[in-house]
Image: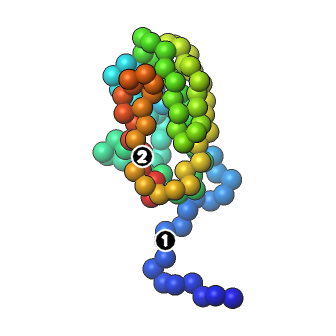
Amino acid sequence: MGSMASGGARATTQPGTLYVVRLVITDHAVAFRGDKFMTRSSIPHYPRGADVRYDVRNRGTRPFSLNILGSTTGIVRPGKERSILVYWSTRGKFVFRPRPNGPAIRIWVV
């Protein structure tokens, strides 16, 4: 058996935990609701390995679609809601946008 080096990476989330976050998208902004990983800078910092279900609500005036790491909502019409499941396996800073021409969504995985 090999030994573990000191100063290794921080622990990831506990397996089997699903976090649920509401994403409310308007024509000009994205709001995260109920996100326990939200920071004061309004950018969620998820631990690597987090499973997050996003309940995506369109409060804008035009239809859009959202793709986060291959999980896609399909077309979400105004007033409608869809859910997607995202597994955050890689650390980094990510930026996504609802299509077409939606506001930026910034997410960090630590």
Front label number (2 vs 1): 2
Q: Residue 34's mark? A: none
**Mark 1 residue type:** Ala
Relative to residue 14, is residue 33 drawn left or right?
left
Where residue 39 sits: x, y (%)?
36, 47
Residue carrying label 1: 9
Question: Residue at 36% of width from left, 33% of height from top?
Answer: 104
Q: Residue furthest left?
A: 41
> Does 71 appear above or below 38?
above
- Most foreground residue, 34 or 86: 86
Where residue 110 sits: x, y (%)?
45, 58
> Does 103 appear above or below 19?
above
- How far apart marks 2 and 1 lie (CA) works out to 20 Å
Residue carrying label 2: 94
- Most foreground residue, 23 or 72: 72
**Mark 2 residue type:** Phe
> Does 75 appear above or below 88?
above
Relative to residue 38, is residue 12 drawn left or right?
right
Where residue 74 sits: x, y (%)?
59, 24
- Most foreground residue, 73 or 11: 73
